[in-house]
Image (cartoon, helix red, strand yellow):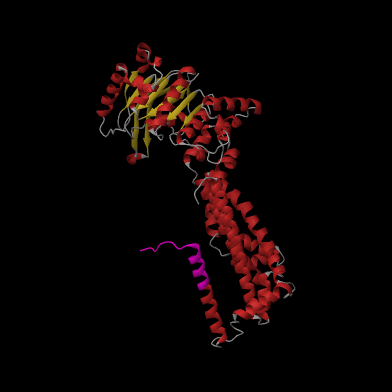
Amino acid sequence: MTSPPLGFRETMLLGLAGLASFIGLWSFLSGSGIVPAQFLPGPLDVASRFIHLLTSPFAGATLPAHLASSFQRYAYGVLLAAAIGVPLGLLMGFFRLLDDIVTPIFDGLRFIAPIAWVPFAALWFGTGIGGPIMIIFAGAFPPCLINAYRGARFVEPRLIEAARMLGTPSSRMILEVLLPAAVPSIIAGLRVSAGLGWQSLVGAELIVAAAGVGFMMVQAQGSVQTPTVMAGMIAIGIVGMLIDILLRQGEGWLRRRRGLES
Amino acid sequence: MGSISFRNVDKVFGHGAGGVKALDDINLEIADKEFVAIVGPSGCGKTTCLRMVAGFEAASAGSVLVNGRPVTAPGPDRAVVFQQFALFPWKTVRENIELGLRNKNLPIGERNDLVAGALKLMNLETHVDAFPHQLSGGMQQRVAIARAYVLDPEVLLMDEPFGALDAQTRVVMQEELVRLARHNPRTVLFITHAVEEAVYLADRVAIMTRRPGRIKEVLDIKAVRERENWDSHARIEDVMDLESFVHLRTHIWKSLREEKGFKDV
């Protein structure tokens, strides 16, 4: 039995009710003293710290400045992953030989968690901007490659045949047939990449960085400022959500333009 | 010039003991500017014949020749019109028709003239900038035919091109194809399971057997058509009522019914 779909208002109300119960439980746990306040700061403490951090620096910068520094690395890492992963995936989808060469290496590498690259990232590229970028890259690269590859590999065979019958050379085949055919799959891959990249970023900054939200959280933990750690977590969650919403909008717009039902 | 020859062509799908023989000793000569239709029951391998001329499949034995040269790969000298249109959904009508000409590296002026001609030929002028999904099935197939015609191919390969269209659209397209074929004759290999369509359009009709596909009989339609002056009738239904047409149609029907597994469509 499935219940009838709810209207927008009901959905919003249920969402708000869930959020309110979560915050209620949280206040109860920290306010009643069951969990000591320095282990679990209350929602009001966290909220006021969040607002405070918007303007007052901690660990060398305000929260927006830390976020900006994180976002810069993140953007570089994800763009680099897309710039290499998408073309390589398309080429692998077209040239069987390349597919056979790259796939075994890639299948092994992609199961190594981005965090596992931390020691080498720090060693090879340092803790400035290079190290974190490499870790974000490690998180964001596989979905870029896999989705571009699948998109190109599973293009409707008739379209490939039509293009070959029209005498289309390989370069044009990739740019004007495989790439556009793979766009929905590539966009889906970029969304996954963006999510994984953002998660890897914060993990990376906890260990190798001299600025950024992750760095701020580590510094706060060192001085047992748990509200600051939580404010950082909330900022990460909000920015991650915003990135996903933006990419979903982009995906929907693209599908409508193509005449595909969303 | 555009002759097609099938010489002792076999096609086996799969390997060894698990292989399935789809075509058995196909022999067929199609002369320059001749319109030949192949009819046969589903799964008889008629589409495979076309795909071998297109260069999408290779013969397992024997040879498939176009203008006396063996076919090795697909190319714009053998334009294909597919049943499911196979238009590029991200390209406009103009861009779809233009792609083959761009691949030939024609100068832009010449390209535009040819595209304009093809658009006019298929009555597509008002839909130049539309995307395929904005067009009806009939219009989409017009674009696919324009895309093939614009290449001025030596042979035109049509794989059940009207099979996906509704009955009324199909009739209009058949009449238009006859108009095209009579005024600007070129070599056409036309695959269909619709008997009337084959008799109405083709100069000769080859009837195939059920798997493994063989050519059972080849009928000369053109001789009857010219003798009985079918082309003096503008409408397809008038031609289909002629005694000579009915006679040929019934002959093919009977021939196909002898093949086990033939289904009316």
* Residue drawn at point x = 28 percent, y = 26 percent: B253
Q: Is residue A209 above or below residue B144?
A: below
Q: Residue at x 60, y 67 (%)?
A: A115
Point out the stretch of residues depicted in magenta.
A1-17
Horizontally, residue B213 falls left or right of residue A213, namely left
Nearer the observer, B28 or A52: A52
For this rendering, which residue is in front, A46 or B191? A46
The quadrant holding residue A72 is: bottom right
Specify whether residue A104 is painted magenta: no
Task: Say whether residue B6 is left or right of residue A214.
Answer: left
Confirm whether residue A106 shows in the render: yes
Image x and y of residue B154, in percent = 50, 22
Query: Residue B196: x and y, percent?
Result: 34, 25
User: Residue B170 location, x and y as percent?
Assistant: 41, 30
Total marks placed: 0
Residue at point 55%, 80% (across, down): A26
